[in-house]
Image (cartoon, grey):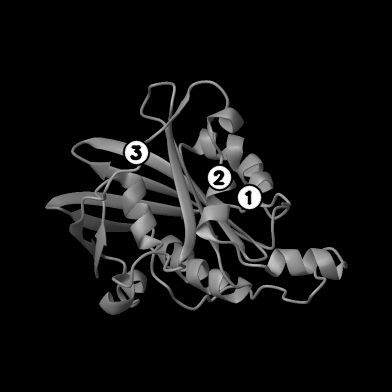
Amino acid sequence: MRVRVTTTALGITAALLAVPACSTGTKPDTAPSARTGKPAAAAQRAAMLSSAALETRLLDESDLGSGYLRKPSRPAQHDDVTVIGCPALSELGGGAATGGALTFPRKAKASFTYASSSSEISEELYSDSANKLSDGIGRIFDAMTGCPTYQVVAGGTAIDMASQKLPAPHQLGDEQWSQLLTFSAGGRSTVVKQTAIRDGSLLLIVSGSPALVDRHLERALAKAERVG
């Protein structure tokens, strides 16, 4: 499978999550008052947000606290990437894989470094119908966690991958996914935790240092869900 991605750990992860597909997991509860029993609240949760609106709901330095520095957005430098040893990912097909992003048009993203170190945290927000969000993210998490080890070749560099499914925070949102990824190349390893929460028509993905993801996940979801 070949996709176009940036050759960073978080960039590769985002690309692998970028394939639209049908979920094999539990379907979301789409009843109008599934969580609140209030039609107005249900309607609000079903409303799709623009990219501009999503941008205002991303965490910023004031939300994260001292020591965080936002990474500037830069034009992505793309390389062909080949995934080896994970049939579930390969079966998604090259056409689907190159279909671009988590291909939801309404999206926003922010990335931060912490304390001038190698620790990073990245937040992505998407908005679409509940079923599309569920289908798009569920199949990819299923595929990635179904392959304990595989390899990614990016720009001529071989990266050994290990994935582990983690317990998801079921008290948050309507659907949840979580995994731990280990990227190994050139004798060095990077561990990335990735947790996705779908709540109504919002999808939140937080990736990065496991401690930072755990620290800021609930705050990120609360801001993403804010009214107004």
Q: Is residue 5 visible?
A: yes
Q: Which residue is mark 1?
A: 224
Rendered position, 59 above or below 135: above
Residue 97 on image: x %, y %: 31, 71
Q: Amino acid at mark 3?
A: Thr
Q: Judging from the image, what secondary structure is the residue with disc 2 in?
A: loop
Q: Are marks 3 and 1 in contact (CB under 8 Å)?
A: no
User: In what element is the residue under mark 3?
Assistant: strand
Please tell me which of labels 3 and 2 falls first in the chain: 2
Mark 1 neighbour density, 10 Å: few (under 14) some (14–19) many (20 or more): many
Q: Residues within 10 Å of mark 2 (few under 14, many from 20)?
A: many
Q: Depth check: give the residue in front, 86 or 40.
A: 40
Residue 17 in picture, x, y percent from top left: 41, 62
Q: Is residue 41 left or right of residue 137?
A: right
N-terminal of the pair, mark 2 or mark 1, is: 2
Q: Amino acid at mark 2?
A: Leu
Q: CA distance from mark 3 to mark 2?
A: 25 Å
For residue 58, the mark is 2
Q: Position of residue 105 (x, y in %)?
A: 45, 67
Q: How many marks?
A: 3
Q: Do the residues under discs 2 and 1 have CB atoms within 8 angstroms?
A: yes
Residue 129 position, x and y percent, is 60, 73
Q: Is residue 23 left or right of residue 87?
A: right
Which residue is rendered at x = 44% and y = 76% of the image?
21
Q: Which comes before the other along the chain, label 3 or label 1?
A: 3
Cα–Cα gap, marks 3 and 1 = 28 Å
Residue located beneath label 3 in the image:
190
Left or right placement of residue 189 versus residue 177 in this view: left
Question: Hey, which quadrant is residue 119 in on the image?
Answer: top left
Instruction: Count neighbours of disc 3 (C-alpha within 10 A) and say few if under 14, some if 14 to 19, many if 20 or more.
Output: some
Residue with the most extreme left position: 156
What is the quadrant of the N terminus in the image? bottom left
